[in-house]
Every structure is written in structure tokens, then in C-alpha cells.
Image (cartoon, grey):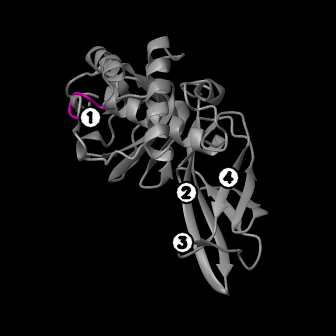
């Protein structure tokens, strides 16, 4: 998955592999972008970077949404397809230069800009999962069965089970679009329709969700610490096996903090922040 800030274009990367080895495609790959509802967005031909690596410039998108990027190319006349997800987001929880300024991350040979981007995405995802809702606006979808009782009723509401739902991106009933002008997101994430809901079996609602218009300082700091941890342990190869719970030396035994039910990251200073937000934000039976 790739995250792109709203209003910005972005280079979409592709690495063509033959087993574990990079290899050149027979011709420049192309990537077709489709929206959350399957509608075509654009198709772009890639340019070669080096060896089996290519990139294609995606146009700027002003709406928070998610696109599917489908790469097509051939290798030795054999057709290949690679699929990725591109999320258009309101913003990020920190800037990459702030992560680069963290201790031990200044070596650009050891930690590339792409590595820092992956670390940020990992940290943001773990934070959102831990507190059950995105900090800044993110794209979400929910599919809800349409019960017979809803047919013909004006104003009948559908619950997104998301009290932090903000803006509707699109709504379909069995793939048929519903006019957004007739829909309203009300309290607790209930979507009402001033018209009758179309006859159908399932409604899919695409919307944005987020509990804040800015990144709180403690969340930003927690995200930076978590991203640094991911870089050092994953890219930096800490040498400590993943299942290690303690380390014994001649000077004694040290118990390692690890992720668990109440430790989403496994770093006490980060976990205490995320647990405090979970306690404030989580709504039982809703979120």
C-alpha cells in the first residue's frame, strides 16, 4: 500500500522480479488506476529507473479516497500483473525529515527515504488500529445489508458504527450510485436519506473518518518513536530474534517489552499514550 497526501501527485514504484532477482520487462509497464467503486481514474505508462525498477507519475487527487493500481507488463512474452493500493490521505502523523533527525537514523545509506516512508506507514497503521479510529481523516468503506423494512421509508438511517465518520465519498446500492445530495451523516455515524433507499440487497458507503483536524503532540511523538523502532529492528537488523522475551548476560537478565493485548507497539512510552486515547475514544458497540 502507498499513501499520498491529498492534492499531491506521486511516483508509484514497481519492481519486476524473476523469482528473487530483478529483471527488465519486455516493454515499459503501464499502471491503471481505478477508484473504490471500480471506476477508471487514469492509466499511466511507467519510465525505467534501473534494472527491473520502474516508476509512474500519478496525477494529484483532491479527495480523500483509495484507488487500486493495477500494473500490467510482460517478461519473456509472459503476461504479468501486480496490484497495489493507493490511499489519498489528509496528511501524515509526522514529516520524514523529523524521523531522519531521530537518533541513529541519519545514515542515508542504511535507511533510505523509502525505508522511512514504510516506517511511517507502519507506525500510523498500528496507531490507528490501537485507538480504533484514524487520527487524521482516512478513507473507509462499510457494506451494510439492506433490510426489507427500509424500502420505501424516507429518512431511514444506516449505521456506519463509526462515531467519527465525517464526509461521504460515495454510496452505492448493489453497485448503483446513490445521489449524495440526499444523504447526511448524523451523530454516531448514522447516514440518513431524504429519499427512499433504492431497492437492493446491500449498500456500500465510502466515507472519511478521523477524530482530529491536527496531530496531537503526544501522538506525533509516539509515531516517531514507533517508526524509529521499526527501522532499527527491521531495516537495521537488530540481531535479536522476534520471539525473544529476555536477554541473559554475565551481568544479569533483562526482560524485553513486547507487543500484546494492552501493549500494541511493545514500547511502554508509546503504549501508554495509545491506551489513553483508546480509553477516551473507544465507544463499545459502536467503534
Q: Which of labels 2 and 1 is toward the front?
A: 1
- Residue extent of the magenta highlight: 259-264
- The span from disc 3 to disc 1 (Cα, nearest Å) is 31 Å
Residue at mark 3: 20
**Residue nearer the viewer, 175 or 117:** 117
Residue at mark 2: 84
Mark 2 crowdedness (10 Å alpha carbons): few <14, some 14-19, many ≥20 = some
Residue at mark 4: 12
Q: Is residue 227 above or below residue 211?
A: below
Residue 163, visible in the rendered structure: yes
- The span from disc 2 to disc 3 (Cα, nearest Å) is 19 Å
Asked whether 260 falls inside the magenta stretch, the response is: yes
* Disc 2 + disc 3, Cβ < 8 Å: no
Which comes before the other along the chain, label 3 or label 4?
4
Which comes before the other along the chain, label 3 or label 1?
3
Residue 169, visible in the rendered structure: no
Residue 2 pos. (x, y %): 57, 46
Residue 143 pos. (x, y %): 36, 46
Asked whether 199 falls inside the magenta stretch, the response is: no
Relative side of 84 to 199, left or right: right
Which residue is most to the right?
Answer: 47
**Residue nearer the viewer, 42 or 232:** 232
Which residue is most to the bottom?
Answer: 77
**Residue nearer the viewer, 93 or 204:** 93
- The span from disc 2 to disc 1 (Cα, nearest Å) is 30 Å
**Residue nearer the viewer, 272 or 192:** 272
Residue at coordinates 28% horizontally, 20% vertically from top-left?
275
Which residue is most to the front?
Answer: 250
Residue at coordinates 43% horizontally, 28% vertically from top-left?
134
Amino acid at each position: 500500500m502507498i499513501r499520498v497526501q491529498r492534492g499531491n501527485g506521486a511516483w508509484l514504484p514497481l519492481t519486476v522480479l524473476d523469482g528473487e532477482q530483478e529483471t527488465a520487462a519486455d516493454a515499459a509497464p503501464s499502471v491503471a488506476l481505478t477508484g473504490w467503486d471500480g471506476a477508471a481514474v487514469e492509466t499511466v505508462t511507467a519510465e525505467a529507473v534501473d534494472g527491473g525498477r520502474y516508476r509512474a507519475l500519478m496525477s494529484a487527487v483532491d479527495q480523500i479516497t483509495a484507488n487500486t493500481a493495477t500494473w500490467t507488463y510482460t517478461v519473456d512474452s509472459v503476461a504479468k500483473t501486480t496490484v497495489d493500493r493507493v490511499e489519498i490521505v489528509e496528511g501524515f502523523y509526522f514529516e520524514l525529515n523529523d524521523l531522519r533527525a531521530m537518533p541513529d537514523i541519519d545514515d542515508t545509506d542504511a535507511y533510505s527515504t523509502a525505508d522511512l516512508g514504510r516506517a511511517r506507514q507502519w507506525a500510523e497503521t498500528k496507531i490507528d488500529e490501537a485507538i480504533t479510529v484514524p487520527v487524521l481523516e482516512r478513507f473507509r468503506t462499510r457494506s451494510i445489508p439492506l433490510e426489507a423494512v427500509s424500502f420505501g421509508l424516507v429518512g431511514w438511517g444506516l449505521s456506519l458504527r463509526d462515531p467519527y465518520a465525517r464526509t461521504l465519498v460515495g454510496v452505492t446500492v448493489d453497485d448503483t450510485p446513490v445521489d449524495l445530495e440526499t444523504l447526511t451523516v448524523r451523530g454516531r455515524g448514522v447516514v440518513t436519506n431524504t429519499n427512499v433507499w433504492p431497492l437492493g440487497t446491500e449498500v456500500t458507503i465510502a466515507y472519511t473518518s478521523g477524530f482530529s483536524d491536527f496531530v496531537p503532540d503526544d501522538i506525533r511523538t509516539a509515531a516517531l518513536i514507533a517508526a524509529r523502532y521499526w527501522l532499527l529492528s527491521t531495516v537495521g537488523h537488530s540481531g535479536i530474534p522476534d520471539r525473544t522475551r529476555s536477554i541473559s548476560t554475565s551481568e544479569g537478565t533483562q526482560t524485553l517489552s513486547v507487543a500484546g493485548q494492552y501493549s500494541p507497539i511493545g514500547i511502554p512510552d508509546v503504549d501508554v499514550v495509545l491506551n489513553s486515547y483508546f480509553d477516551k475514544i473507544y465507544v463499545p458497540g459502536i467503534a
